[in-house]
Amino acid sequence: AQKVTQAQTEISVVEKEDVTLDCVYETRDTTYYLFWYKQPPSGELVFLIRRNSFDEQNEISGRYSWNFQKSTSSFNFTITASQVVDSAVYFCALSEDRGGSNYKLTFGKGTLLTVNP
Amino acid sequence: DGGITQSPKYLFRKEGQNVTLSCEQNLNHDAMYWYRQDPGQGLRLIYYSQIVNDFQKGDIAEGYSVSREKNESFPLTVTSAQKNPTAFYLCASSRHDRGYEKLFFGSGTQLSVL
């Protein structure tokens, strides 16, 4: 069975600190997709990034970076020089691709990040 | 602007009452989903629909019902059979029902029991 673990329930940092959100996943499939979503206080989840299991390149987008390591089944998310607007709940999710529409999307329980001024 | 609209933002249910949560999208997406979020928990799938007039149960469908009569609309009814309905409900859509598709979410409905 697939599983996503976000061990950090809550993280609190001071503005301008770097912060890393951990995500560990379990899957038996060789083809799968990993996602990060952000849920600000307004409630709607916003897509941040998608990675497929064959692409282990790390990615940087502005202050955000993602480190995907298949060897440790991890897909960690780092925010550099955090800002108050980064305060939100962040979800990691895993989708197993079994062809066509037969897939399952599993979310982790989320990490609440609070960035204090 | 395209997006997903959920209404109402807050909803109160009396015991024994059915209530319906609205979800409308103008993204021309084929697939739509309903998720339930409880405090400190991840999202759990209630129902999903790949196409008009078709829908499938998710992991926690008991006590809920849906319809998909139009592509842009996917209302969720919380029936009296759902004994613990208090939660935050999120509607989502994607272009197609495929594992690699990213989801677009509405701003949610907070349902509480009076």
Image (tube, rainbow, N blue to C red):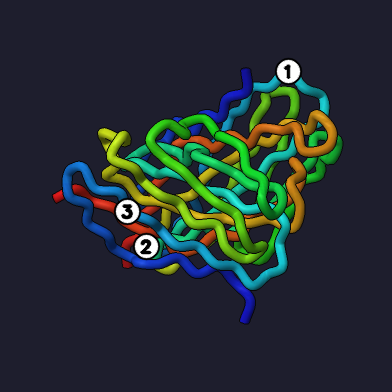
Q: Is residue B83 above or below residue A112?
A: above
> Which residue is drawn at the image coordinates 73% and 31% (left, top)?
A96
Residue located beneath label 1 in the image: A28
Q: In the structure shown, which secondary structural element does the residue marked by tag 1 occupy?
A: loop
Q: Residue beneath label 3, please?
A: B19
Measure how far apart labels 3 and 1 are at the Cα level. Answer: 39 Å
Q: Is residue A50 above or below residue B63?
A: below
Circle 2 is placed at which residue position?
A41
Tell me the kind of residue under disc 2: Pro
Say which chain tag 2 marks: A
Q: For the N terminus of chain B, which image quadrant?
A: bottom right
Q: Position of residue A39 (x, y in %)?
A: 46, 56
Q: Marks 1 and 3: in contact by CB < 8 Å?
A: no
Q: Chain ID for label 3?
A: B
- Mark carried by residue A67: none
Q: Residue at x 51, y 35 (%)?
A: A108
- Whether callout 3 and callout 1 share a subunit is answered no
Nearer-N-terminus badge (2/1): 1
Q: In the figure, residue A30 lies in which quadrant?
A: top right
Helix, strand or loop at mark 2? loop
Tell me the distance, in whole angstroms, between the alpha carbons under discs 2 and 3: 25 Å
Left or right: B112, with A107 as reference point: left
Count residues near mark 2 (Cα–Cα under 10 Å), then give few for <14, some for 14-19, many for 20+: few
Q: Which residue: 32% across, 67% down?
A: A117
